Every structure is written in C-alpha cells, then in structure tokens.
Image: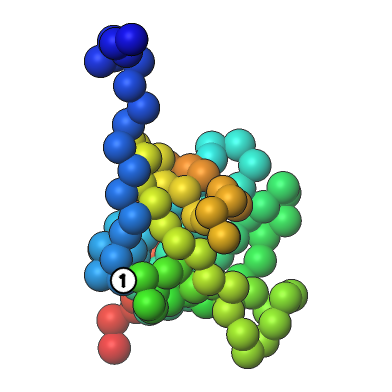
C-alpha cells in the first residue's frame, strides 16, 4: 500500500547540545496556549505555565535541554531530549512528550544586559 506524500509524517530530528543552544537561546518556545518559556542567552529561564510565572535556569548538555526548576530542586536539573518534528519542538522524557511547542524570536529583552 502506498501512502500519499502529503500524508507522510514530518521527519524527526533529535537535536545535539549545540543545536539546542542555537535553537532556544534568546528565543521563546510555546504551545501558544498553556505554556511559554523564554530562554535568555545568559542561562536564565522565565516560564509561564497555566497562568503562573516562575523563574529558573536552563542549559544544554549531553544532547539534552536541562531546566533547573527551584520548585522541584535547587541543585538537580530536569533534562529532556529535544526533538524537532516539522516546525515543532518536542521535549521528551524517556520517549514521552512532556512539552510540544513552536519557537519564535524573542524581544531584545531576552539578550543579556551589556557589561
């Protein structure tokens, strides 16, 4: 049985550490409704999830996006594989999608302050 090309699922690409930094650094990732994450170039993270805004830190290491969420732990980050599926980024934990959203450029306020 042949599947029409238009119905084919977009390819999945697991991002490397460098690709994760390049993809999210200085950008806003959101599902457009329930959550949004602002990734500052200096490692700060501002998260808006279900109407609550919280701060944290982010880094990319070992081909994963790691989020240090003070309400979870002040020392151990939560790390996710990041997979690009078409225009969407998916954060996955043990293969399960935890977050799925799109990336957009952020306002200049996401850049670190000049020294």
Q: Residue 63, located in which quarter of the rendered image?
A: bottom left
Residue 5 image point, x, y percent: 25, 15
Report the quarter where the N terminus lies: top left
Determine whether the residue tagged by mark 1 lies in a helix, strand or loop. Answer: helix
Q: How many residues crowd around disc 1 within 10 Å: few (fewer than 14), some, or many (20 or more)?
A: some
Report the quarter where the C terminus lies: bottom left
Q: Dot 1 corresponds to which residue?
A: 17
Residue 40 image point, x, y percent: 41, 69
Residue 109 in view (yes/no): no
Q: Is residue 24 left or right of residue 54?
A: left
Image vertical order of residue 38 relative to residue 65, above or below: above
Q: Tell me which residue sits at (36%, 27%) in the image.
A: 9
Color theme of the render: rainbow
Image vertical order of residue 50 relative to residue 26, above or below: above
Residue 7 image point, x, y percent: 35, 15
Residue 10 image point, x, y percent: 32, 31
**Which one is nearer the viewer's eye here, 95 or 21?**
95
Q: Tell me which residue sits at (54%, 37%) in the image.
A: 32
Q: Tell me which residue sits at (61%, 37%) in the image.
A: 33
Looking at the image, how many numbered discs can be counted on the residues?
Answer: 1
Image vertical order of residue 68 relative to residue 99, above or below: below
Q: Tell me which residue sits at (31%, 49%) in the image.
A: 13
Q: Is residue 108 left or right of residue 52?
A: left
Q: Is residue 40 left or right of residue 52?
A: left
**Which one is nearer the viewer's eye here, 71 or 26?**
71
Residue 61 in view (yes/no): yes
Image vertical order of residue 16 relative to residue 6, above or below: below
Residue lying furthest front: 1
């Amino acid at each position: 049985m042949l599947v029409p090309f238009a119905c084919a699922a977009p390819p999945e690409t697991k991002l490397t550490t460098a690709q994760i930094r390049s993809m999210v650094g200085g950008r806003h990732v959101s599902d457009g409704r329930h959550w949004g994450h602002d990734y500052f170039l200096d490692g700060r993270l501002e998260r808006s999830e279900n109407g609550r805004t919280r701060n944290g830190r982010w880094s990319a290491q070992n081909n994963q996006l790691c989020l240090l969420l003070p309400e979870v732990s002040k020392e151990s980050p939560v790390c996710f594989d990041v997979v690009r599926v078409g225009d969407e980024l998916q954060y996955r934990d043990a293969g399960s999608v935890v977050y799925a959203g799109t990336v957009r450029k952020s306002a200049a306020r996401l850049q670190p302050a000049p020294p």
